[in-house]
Protein backbone atom coordinates (compact mmCIF):
# COMPACT_ATOMS: atom_id res chain seq x y z
CA UNK A 1 0.00 0.00 0.00
CA UNK A 2 1.34 3.38 -1.02
CA UNK A 3 0.47 6.75 0.45
CA UNK A 4 -0.94 9.41 -1.90
CA UNK A 5 -2.20 12.97 -1.75
CA UNK A 6 -4.60 14.68 -4.13
CA UNK A 7 -5.15 18.43 -4.07
CA UNK A 8 -8.42 19.64 -5.60
CA UNK A 9 -9.49 23.12 -6.68
CA UNK A 10 -13.29 23.22 -6.53
CA UNK A 11 -15.67 25.77 -7.97
CA UNK A 12 -16.52 28.59 -5.53
CA UNK A 13 -20.11 28.34 -6.76
CA UNK A 14 -20.63 24.90 -5.18
CA UNK A 15 -22.70 24.96 -2.02
CA UNK A 16 -21.40 23.30 1.15
CA UNK A 17 -23.91 20.49 0.64
CA UNK A 18 -22.70 19.89 -2.94
CA UNK A 19 -19.04 19.96 -1.83
CA UNK A 20 -19.73 17.38 0.87
CA UNK A 21 -21.55 15.13 -1.61
CA UNK A 22 -18.66 15.41 -4.08
CA UNK A 23 -16.08 14.57 -1.40
CA UNK A 24 -18.23 11.65 -0.22
CA UNK A 25 -18.27 10.32 -3.80
CA UNK A 26 -14.47 10.59 -4.12
CA UNK A 27 -14.00 8.91 -0.73
CA UNK A 28 -16.30 6.11 -1.89
CA UNK A 29 -14.20 5.61 -5.03
CA UNK A 30 -11.01 5.38 -2.96
CA UNK A 31 -12.53 2.79 -0.62
CA UNK A 32 -14.12 0.82 -3.47
CA UNK A 33 -10.74 0.52 -5.21
CA UNK A 34 -9.08 -0.95 -2.11
CA UNK A 35 -7.76 2.22 -0.49
CA UNK A 36 -8.32 3.91 2.85
CA UNK A 37 -8.77 7.59 3.63
CA UNK A 38 -6.25 9.14 6.03
CA UNK A 39 -7.46 12.76 6.08
CA UNK A 40 -9.78 15.13 4.24
CA UNK A 41 -8.34 18.59 4.80
CA UNK A 42 -10.60 21.43 3.65
CA UNK A 43 -8.46 24.53 3.21
CA UNK A 44 -11.43 26.71 2.34
CA UNK A 45 -12.00 29.55 -0.10
CA UNK A 46 -8.82 31.23 -1.39
CA UNK A 47 -7.94 33.92 -3.89
CA UNK A 48 -6.24 32.60 -7.00
CA UNK A 49 -3.10 34.06 -8.60
CA UNK A 50 -4.75 34.02 -12.03
CA UNK A 51 -8.27 33.44 -13.33
CA UNK A 52 -9.42 29.83 -13.69
CA UNK A 53 -12.52 29.57 -15.87
CA UNK A 54 -12.90 33.35 -15.46
CA UNK A 55 -13.11 33.12 -11.65
CA UNK A 56 -10.59 34.56 -9.18
CA UNK A 57 -11.55 32.41 -6.17
CA UNK A 58 -11.62 28.68 -5.52
CA UNK A 59 -12.19 26.18 -2.72
CA UNK A 60 -9.20 23.95 -1.93
CA UNK A 61 -9.43 20.41 -0.54
CA UNK A 62 -6.55 18.02 0.19
CA UNK A 63 -7.22 14.27 0.24
CA UNK A 64 -4.62 12.00 1.85
CA UNK A 65 -5.11 8.27 1.38
CA UNK A 66 -3.39 4.91 1.04
CA UNK A 67 -3.96 2.30 -1.61
CA UNK A 68 -2.61 0.47 -4.64
CA UNK A 69 -1.20 2.43 -7.58
CA UNK A 70 -4.14 1.77 -10.00
CA UNK A 71 -6.42 3.54 -7.52
CA UNK A 72 -4.96 6.92 -8.52
CA UNK A 73 -5.74 6.36 -12.20
CA UNK A 74 -9.36 5.49 -11.41
CA UNK A 75 -9.72 8.44 -9.03
CA UNK A 76 -8.31 10.88 -11.59
CA UNK A 77 -10.56 9.46 -14.31
CA UNK A 78 -13.59 10.20 -12.13
CA UNK A 79 -12.27 13.66 -11.21
CA UNK A 80 -11.92 14.58 -14.90
CA UNK A 81 -15.59 13.82 -15.63
CA UNK A 82 -16.96 15.46 -12.47
CA UNK A 83 -18.45 18.94 -12.76
CA UNK A 84 -17.30 21.46 -10.17
CA UNK A 85 -13.64 20.41 -10.03
CA UNK A 86 -11.47 22.94 -11.84
CA UNK A 87 -7.98 21.50 -11.28
CA UNK A 88 -6.29 18.67 -9.41
CA UNK A 89 -2.88 17.19 -8.77
CA UNK A 90 -1.98 13.79 -7.29
CA UNK A 91 1.35 13.03 -5.64
CA UNK A 92 2.85 9.86 -4.16
CA UNK A 93 3.94 10.67 -0.59
CA UNK A 94 5.56 7.32 0.31
CA UNK A 95 6.21 3.93 -1.26
CA UNK A 96 4.92 2.15 1.82
CA UNK A 97 2.36 3.21 4.37
CA UNK A 98 1.40 1.71 7.67
CA UNK A 99 -2.05 0.19 7.76
CA UNK A 100 -4.77 2.71 8.55
CA UNK A 101 -7.22 1.53 11.19
Image (cartoon, grey):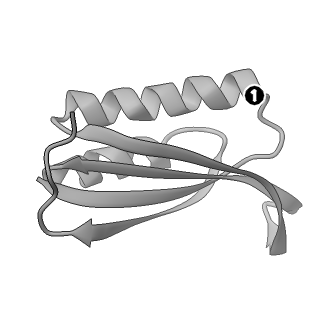
Q: Is residue 20 visible?
A: yes
Whether residue 21 is situated above or below residue 62 in the rendered picture: above
* Nearer to us in this view, 42 or 90: 42
Picture residue at 85% right of the left edge, 59% below the top: 57
Q: How many marks?
A: 1
* Nearer to us in this view, 53 or 2: 2
Picture residue at 30% right of the left edge, 59% below the top: 4
Relative image position of residue 48 (x, y in whole percent):
81, 70
Q: Is mark 1 on a helix, strand or loop?
A: helix
Q: Is residue 20 left or right of residue 32?
A: right
Q: Is residue 67 left or right of residue 21?
A: left
Q: Is residue 62 left or right of residue 51?
A: left
Q: Is residue 32 left or right of residue 57?
A: left
Q: Mark 1 points at which residue?
A: 16
Picture residue at 79% right of the left edge, 28% below the top: 15
Relative image position of residue 35 (x, y in whole percent):
21, 39
Q: Can residue 69 be seen in this view?
A: no
Whether residue 24 is situated above or below residue 98 in the rendered picture: above
Whether residue 90 is situated above or below residue 83 in the rendered picture: below
Amino acid sequence: MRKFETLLLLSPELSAKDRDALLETLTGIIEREGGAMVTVDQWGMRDLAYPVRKLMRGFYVRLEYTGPAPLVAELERNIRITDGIFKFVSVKLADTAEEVA
